[in-house]
Image (cartoon, grey):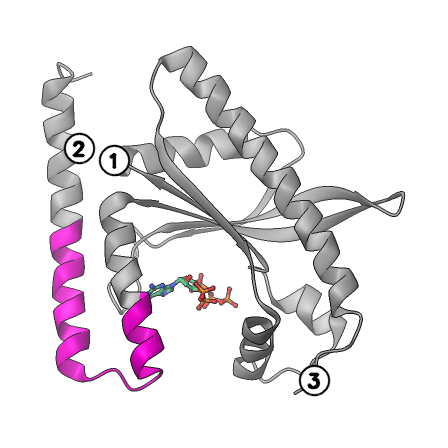
Amino acid sequence: MNINNDIDEVLCKYLLGKNVLETKIQKMIDAFVKEHNYNPVEHIKSRIKSKESIKNKLISKNLDGTIDNVVNNIKDIIGIRLVCSFLTDIYDIVSLISMIPDINIIEKKDYISNPKSSGYTSYHLIVLVPIVYNGKKDFVKAEIQIRTVAQDFWASLSHKIQYKYEDNIPNNIKEEMYEYSLIVNQLDRKMVNLNKIVNGNK
Ligand code: 0O2
C-alpha cells in the first residue's frame, strides 16, 4: 500500500500538535507540583507514529491509504504516555487533563476497570489538540496513555512479545502474561494501601 504523498504535510501538523500537547501537559504538572508539593508523573514519553505503522494500521482496518482515512481513522498518530507511581494518580491525572483549557477529551477508555483480554491495563484518552498551521486554526487527534510503572513494565514486555511473534503468540506465553497482569494489578493495589498508611491514611 502507498499512502498519499500529502502524508508528510499532514505529519507536520501532528508534530505541531504533539508540541502543543506536551507543553500544556507539562504546565499542568508544574502547576500541580507547585500546589501539592507532589509530582504524580514519574516520566513522560511521546512519539509520532511512523509511516510504516500508520500504513499497517490502515491495512488492519481494511482501509485505503488516503489522507482522509489517516486523519479520520488513526487516532494515535500523536501518542503521549504518562507513567505514574500509584493507581490513584491515574485518575487524578485524568481529571487534571480534563481541566486543561482548549484540550477536548472525545473518548475515554478505562482498561483498568475493563482490562483487555491480553491482560493489558492502562487508561486511554483521545483528545483534540488545537493548532495553527499556515495561519489557519485546526485540530489534530492525540492518544494519551496513562499507566503505573508496574503496568508499564508489563506492557513493555507484552510489546516485545507481540513484535517477536506477530499474531502467533504461543498460548503458554499468553497465559503466563495474563497471570502476571493479575499480579501487577494486585501489586498496584497493595502499593496504594501501603502509601495511604505511610501518609497517615490521607
Ligand atoms: P502501538 O505500537 O503502541 O502504537 P485503535 O487502535 O485506536 O484504532 P483500538 O483497538 O480501540 O483501536 O485501540 P485501543 O485498544 O484503545 O488502543 C490500542 C493501543 O493500546 C495499542 O496501540 C497499544 O499501544 C495499547 N495496547 C492494547 N493492547 C495491548 C497489549 O496487549 N499489550 C501492549 N503492550 N499494548 C497494548 P497500537 O497501535 O496497537 O500499538
Q: Between residue 190 and residue 38, name the one nearer to us.
A: 38
- Is 52 covered by the magenta stretch? no
Query: Could you tell me the amino acid type at mark 2?
Result: Val
Q: Do callouts 1 and 2 mark residues in contact (Cβ within 8 Å)?
A: yes
Residue 2 is marked as 3
Question: Disc 2 designates what residue?
Answer: 192
Quadrant of the image containing the C terminus: top left
Query: Could you tell me the amino acid type at mark 1?
Result: Phe
Q: For ligand 1, tell me if the residue under mark 1 lies within 8 Å.
A: no
Q: Position of residue 135 (x, y in %)?
A: 90, 43
Q: CA distance from mark 3 to mark 1?
A: 43 Å
The residues colored magenta run: 159-184
Q: Position of residue 148 (x, y in %)?
A: 28, 43
**Which type of secondary structure does the marked residue at label 1 adopt?**
loop
Query: Which one is earlier in the sequence, the residue at label 3 or at label 1?
Result: 3
Q: Nearer the viewer, mark 3 or mark 1?
A: 3
Q: Nearer the viewer, mark 3 or mark 2?
A: 3
